[in-house]
Amino acid sequence: MNLDSSPIAAIATAAGRGGIGVVRASGRDLAALTAALFPNAVFKPRHATYIDFTAADGSVIDQGIAMAFTGPHSYTGEDVLELQGHGGPVVLQMLLARVLEAGATCGLRLAEPGEFTRRAYLNDKLDLAQAEAVADLIDASTEAAAKSASQSLSGAFSKTIHTLVEQTIDLRMLVEATLDFPEEEIDFLDKSDARGQLAVIIGSLDKVFTQAAQGALLREGLNVVLVGQPNVGKSSLLNALAGADVAIVTPIAGTTRDKVSETIQIEGIPLHIIDTAGIRTIDDAVDQVERIGIARTWGEVGKADVILHLLDASYGPTAADEHIVAALPAGVPVLRIWNKIDLSGHQPAVDAAPDAINVYLSAHEHLGIDLLRAELLRIAGWQQTGESLFLARERHLIALRAARGHLAAAADHAARTDQSLDLFAEELRLAQAQLSSITGAFSSDDLLGVIFGRFCIGK
Ligand code: GDP
Ligand code: ZN
């Protein structure tokens, strides 16, 4: 693993304007850089110093706070220098340029995306699951997602994984000690209660998996597509579902002037909703660029987790609805929403037909909206466990699932008296390797590249 500790710098705060902006530098030794930037200052580590940030010619770029951290007591584990100035894009660029200029002689360069956090990981300030949680906390789109990211960042997820790894190691040691004494193999499993220990590990792993899978849901959310004829109430339903969370609605500019996609939340789970009414058909596209955009949006429809097909409850499906149904991608669950029951006289209800689930509601009168919310949560697989959740990633779920498979195989071997302990031991070893990959004990440079490459610059 390459431990590059040459000095790096970047703007660490978000692009755009803000009250404060931070330029951060990190490296094994920043004494030369600090002396070049502030010839007359002596900084006490981790104390704020109000100071002029000056250009090479002595003119003042900005005034702000300088803070020096001496490695290993810093975010990256290296020397870190943070300059907090005013948060304007131009002034921050000037400050960054000045820092890069002052550090040129000691090899200072612009940081790559995620490089600060990558160094924190390589210097054992964070493990891999925690480093991922940094990015997830920054990207969190709901409060619940932010809470579980911060839970993972604090190390709660990693600690649970470590416990599983240690329990697996204990069992392996027990088994491998016996492997050296073949005559004892036969009654080893009974004497040592290896099966009981294995069952305990499997039980804990299943619990972690549930917490992680629920957390993954908070992170990824549910992709929902609204289809239906004009005026059946798609926009009204979107507003009714969003309810008190309307403030969080984030319009994303589509290929047309209509809003195509927005994100609302139900119990903290982001619902990414595409309203097909805003999408034009390929035939209506004015140019190639728009055609590509439209094709991409329809592609998204195919990746939906659930489709809401809206119909007017006061009259049955029309020929146009038959066309809509025929055009829907196969394999995606469909909720048939009968809207406007205030006009038709139906009661709010959910009933499962063989081909789709029918939901009767009124978007305008807010009748049956709770039934729909509950139905969406059910489809998402949301369970209110009351447990704290880990904002897990797909990578973690895959590793947990693989580990579970190896433990189940080990249990299989243990259940049969005609097999040697070698196979049992080997499955335990494989399970341990999968679990360890979550916190990064066996991670490859490739994996690190993928994980940290997705960070923004400055993190
Ligand atoms: P869209 O074209 O599918 O997005 O439909 P809109 O949400 O714009 O609604 C079309 C019309 O139907 C509007 O006048 C709404 O007020 C009305 N509408 C929507 N939902 C209901 C409902 O549940 N009951 C009644 N009576 N009218 C509704
Ligand atoms: Zn509409």
Image: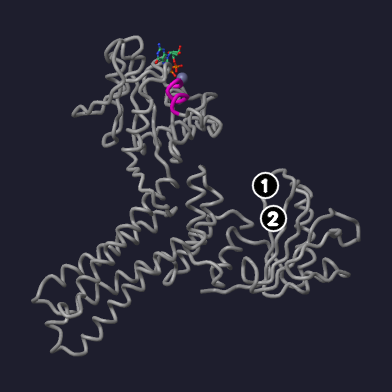
Say whether marks 1 and 2 touch (CB < 8 Å). yes
For the record, the magenta segment spans: 235-241
At 44% across and 68% down in the image, what residue appears? 440
Towards the viewer: 332 or 433 = 433
Q: Quadrant of the C terminus?
A: bottom right
* Label at residue 389: none
Mark 2 neighbour density, 10 Å: few (under 14) some (14–19) many (20 or more): many
* Label at residue 11: 2
Q: Quick check: 218 left or right of 401? A: right
Instruction: Spot the residue most to the right.
Output: 58
At 53% across and 60% down in the image, what residue appears? 452
At 35% across and 23% down in the image, what residue appears? 368
At 20% across and 75% down in the image, what residue appears? 193
Q: How many marks?
A: 2
Q: Quick check: 133 left or right of 346? A: right
Residue 126 lies in magenta, yes or no? no
Q: Most prominent secondary structure in the magenta stretch?
A: helix
Give how far across and how far down residue 315 sits, in percent: 29, 10
Residue 238 lies in magenta, yes or no? yes
The type of residue carrying mark 1 is: Ala
The type of residue carrying mark 2 is: Ile
Give how far across and how far down residue 42 sits, in percent: 83, 71
Q: Can you say whether 167 is above or below 456 in the image?
A: below
Give how far across and how far down residue 150 sits, in percent: 52, 55
| Label 1 – label 2 distance at C-alpha | 8 Å
| Residue that carries the numbered disc 1 in the rendered image | 15
Q: Can you say whether 71 is above or below 225 in the image?
A: below
Quadrant position of residue 274: top left
User: Would the CB of label 2 be found within 8 Å of ligand 2?
Assistant: no
Ligand 1 shows up in the quarter that is top left
